[in-house]
Image (cartoon, rainbow, N blue to C red):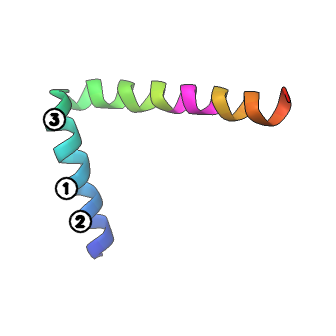
Amino acid sequence: MQLIEQHKKFIAWYQEKLGLSDYGLLWFVFFKGVVLTLIIERLLFHS
């Protein structure tokens, strides 16, 4: 349970630091995942 609470605090800190709403944070995380997926895909399949 402590890990979950730490994670919630980190997300709240991250959101405050970037000045994002809940909706904005969701879009940011989505696009971060897309970029990370593309980078990993390039590294694994385009060598």
The numbered disc on residue 5 is: 2
Q: Which amino acid does label 1 sit on?
A: Lys
Q: What residue type is labelled 2?
A: Glu
Q: What residue type is labelled 3?
A: Lys
Q: In which quarter of the image is residue 17?
A: top left
Determine whether, in the image, residue 19 is placed left or right of residue 28: left
The numbered disc on residue 29 is: none
Q: Main secondary structure of the magenta part?
A: helix
Q: Position of residue 26 (x, y in %)?
A: 35, 31
Judge depth for marks 2 and 3 and give the one in front. 3
Q: 22 or 12, which is in the foreground?
A: 12
Extent of the magenta region:
33-37
Q: Position of residue 21 (x, y in %)?
A: 18, 27
How many discs appear? Answer: 3
Identify the residue shown where x is 63% and y is 32%.
37
Identify the residue shown where x is 57% and y is 32%.
36
Asked if disc 1 and disc 2 are in contact, CB closer than 8 Å, the reply is yes
The residue carrying mark 1 is: 9
Secondary element type, mark 3: helix
Any magenta on residue 17?
Answer: no
How far, Cα to Cα, is label 2 from label 3?
Answer: 18 Å
How far, Cα to Cα, is label 1 from label 2?
Answer: 6 Å
Q: In which quarter of the image is residue 38?
A: top right
Q: How crowded is mark 3: few (under 14 residues within 10 Å), some or many (20 or more)?
A: few
The residue carrying mark 3 is: 17
Q: 2 or 41, which is in the foreground?
A: 41
